[in-house]
Image (cartoon, helix red, strand yellow):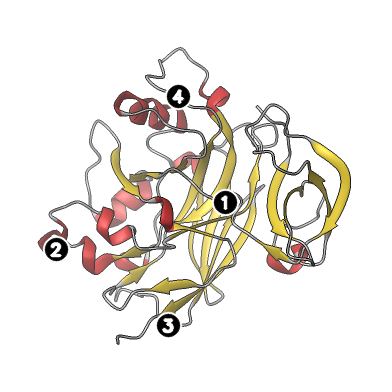
Amino acid sequence: MARFGKLLRFKNTSGQVFYGEAKDLPQITKDALIGAEVPVFSAGQEPWSDDFKLSGSTEKIAEVLAPLPKVPIFLCIGLNYKKHAEEGGMKVGEYPQTFYKPADALAGPFEDIPIHPACQWMDYEVELCVVIGKDCKNVSEDEDVTQYILGYTVGNDVSARWWQMPERSNNQPSMAKSFDKFAPIGPVITSPDIIADPKQLRMRSIVNGDQRQITQTDDLIFDIPAIIRHFSRAMTIRKGTVIMTGTPSGVAAFMKPPAWLQDGDVVEMELEHVGTMRNKMVFEKSE
C-alpha cells in the first residue's frame, strides 16, 4: 500500500487537481492550507496503488477538496461511545449497530452542506473515520486489520433527526443520514504510521464557535478491528470505503432543549493528527 504522512487532495491556482503531502505543515486548517505549497504525487495514480509516489515537484493549494474523489459507500456505526449511550439512556447490544450512507453523501472538508427542505431537527456528529485501502472479506480474529487501512480522517455524520424517529424510520436510521453531502470528511487522510493507536486521539465538534462534543477515542465501545471484522462477515469491504465509527456525547438531540442546527450555522470537526473541517449548513428553500 502507498506510503504518505498526511494525504491532501486539492486544486492549484490553474484548477488542476493533485494529491499532496501535508505532513510538514504546522496546522491542517482552511486558513493554513490555502496558499501553502506542498509536494505532490505523480499524476493519474490512486493512493492505494503500489506506484503512488511523490513526483519531486510542488504545487500551491488554491482549493481543498474531499481527500477522495469518490467512495463506494460509507459504512457507519451507531451508539459506539459509552458516554453517548449513557446520555441517551440506551442499551448497547452484543454486536455493533450498523447503517449506511450512499456514495453521494461525500462532501469536502470546507464545502457548504445543502439541507433539503424535507429535513428537520438537524444534528451534527463528529466521528473518527477509517479509510479502507485494500479489499477485505471475512477478516479473522488473528489478522492484523491495519493491512487493510489506508489511513484515518475526521467526518461529520450529518443527521436529520426528524427522519430518524421510529414513526418515520421504523428504527432504520439510514434515511435520516443519507441525503447528498451528509458525510463531509477531511481535510487529510493521516497514515497509520502517524496514528499508531487510533484509540488515543482527542476529538471534538464546535458549532458557531461553541464546543459541543469532546472526547478521547478510548471511550469507543467497539474498536476498529471489531468493526472491520463485523462488516466483513456480511460483505466485501472495497478499497476507498469510509467507515464512520460513531459519535461521542454532546449531540444536539440530547441537549435540553435540543440545539438543532440552523441555516448558516458553521460546524467544525477536529481530530488530533488530522486537522479541522469547517462546513456551513445551507438550508434550501421549498419551491
Task: Check disc 2 and report its element: helix, strand or loop.
Answer: helix
Residue designated by label 1? 69
Residue at mark 2: 168
Packing grade of label 4 (10 A; few <14, some 14-19, many >=20) is many
Q: Above or below — where is 40 with respect to 3?
A: below
User: Distance of mark 2 from mark 4, alpha carbons?
Assistant: 34 Å
Q: CA distance from mark 3 to mark 1?
A: 27 Å
Provide the residue designation for mark 3.
263
Q: Amino acid at mark 1?
A: Pro
The earlier-in-sequence mark between 1 and 4 is: 1
Relative to 68, is 121 on the left or the right? left
Q: Position of residue 271 (x, y in %)?
A: 59, 52
Q: Label 2 sits on what residue type?
A: Arg
Between tags 4 and 3, which lies in front?
4
Residue count near mark 2 (Cα–Cα under 10 Å), binned few <14, some 14–19, many ≥20 = few
Residue occupying image coordinates x 38% and y 37%: 221
Q: Residue furthest front?
A: 44
Q: Earlier in the sequence, mark 4 or mark 3?
A: 4
Residue 54: image x %, image y %?
81, 39
Residue 282, disc: none
